[in-house]
Image: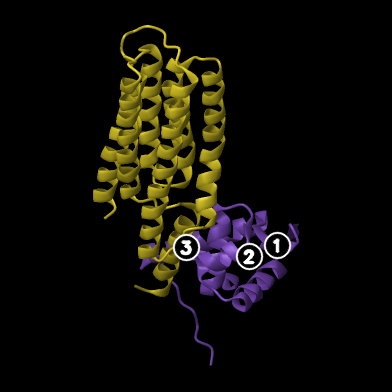
Chain colours: A yellow, B purple
Amino acid sequence: MNKYENDLTHIRQMMERSSTFISLSGLSGVGAGLVAIVGCLLTFYILGQHNIDYFDGKPNYYSYQVLWQLASVAIVTLVLALMSGIYFTAKKSKKLGHPLWSAATKNTIKAAAIPLVTGGLFCIIVTLHHLFYLVAPCMLIFYGLALVSASKYTQSDVFWLGMFELALGLFAAVFVGYGLIFWGIGFGVLHIVYGVWMYQKYK
Amino acid sequence: MDVPKIQIGTTVKDIDISNINKDFESRVRLGIMSVLMVNEWVNFNDMKQMLELSDGNLASHTIALEGKNYIEVRKAFVGRKPETSYRATVEGKQSFQKHIEALAALIGKG
């Protein structure tokens, strides 16, 4: 390799490294997916404890006690999923020798944050209106939008994960009453499938 | 003694060699320009991290690039800390693009 070739390679590398967040680990997806499935099962368990049949097709008016328990599960699930995501990604970036907190990381988070925060607030508003059946579809749709938006700054595969989440969210909005199942597929199964696939691809 | 330059069958590509820009010869400057081609404003610390440079090394090269009007510098306060950020000028982007094309042309020939 001569100097010119070296220079070009260097330019390409620097452009890519500075603009894309490549440390996103497939294991992060697997970890978040497993947490989501446990969260889902716990939700079923709590509903069962209160003798609520989620699939009876009737509009549900949950008591505040149930709502608080479900909200706690949701928050713990979110925190654990985030922690597993950050843990595996930090580990991978250390292995690659890239700084975790780079301009590319910031761009990725910024791109995802607007749809995510909007979606989170919207879900809380939906809950306040007692439209519980719309919470799962909304979460899936806004999460999908966040991924599509963030995919510009990270592995392009994230775009397709986002599209699947979006489609699933729309389906969930059509077939209301099965929100929890769609939620489990979107946040659990899809994350695990995607994570394993990514892990194989970028190993 | 002058060696006479004899060229037979010059092609369009030969013109590109004149675009090899001495200002971009150093690795560090190549790195700075590459980062600024794909990012808008990049602050000093992010740049330092990405290119794995020391403060002094980065500073001297950014001053040189600024002097050539290839990059522009913005100094702002984030809280109480001063923060310096860089952005490629239109001129800088054009010159660097030409440099990249010249490199590619040279490799294509060899």
Q: Residue at x 52, y 45 (%)?
A: A109
For residue A76, side relative to residue B97 (left or right):
left
Compared to A112, does A24 lie above or below?
below
In this view of the protein, can residue A202 be seen by the observer? yes
* Within-10-Å neighbours for mark 1: few <14, some 14–19, many 20+: some
Q: Which mark is residue A105?
A: none
Q: Residue furthest bottom?
A: B1
Quarter of the image with the N terminus of chain A is bottom left
Q: Which mark is residue A99?
A: 3
Q: Pick whichever, A95 or A84, lies toward us.
A: A84
Say which amino acid is labelled 2.
Phe
Chain letter of mark 3 equals: A
Q: Position of residue B91 (x, y in %)?
A: 66, 57
Q: Which mark is residue B83?
A: 1
* Within-10-Å neighbours for mark 3: few <14, some 14–19, many 20+: some
**CB atoms at circles 2 and 1 under 8 Å apart?**
yes
Secondary structure found at label 2: helix
**CB atoms at circles 3 and 2 under 8 Å apart?**
no
Circles 2 and 1 on the same subunit: yes
Chain letter of mark 2 equals: B
Q: Residue furthest top?
A: A58
> Circle 2 is placed at which residue position?
B44
Secondary structure found at label 1: strand
Q: Position of residue B38 (x, y in %)?
A: 54, 53
Chain letter of mark 1 equals: B
Q: Residue at x 31, y 36 (%)?
A: A38
In this view of the protein, can residue B10 be seen by the observer? no
Quarter of the image with the C terminus of chain A is bottom left
Q: Residue at x 50, y 52 (%)?
A: A105
Circles 3 and 1 on the same subunit: no
Compared to A197, does B96 lie above or below?
below
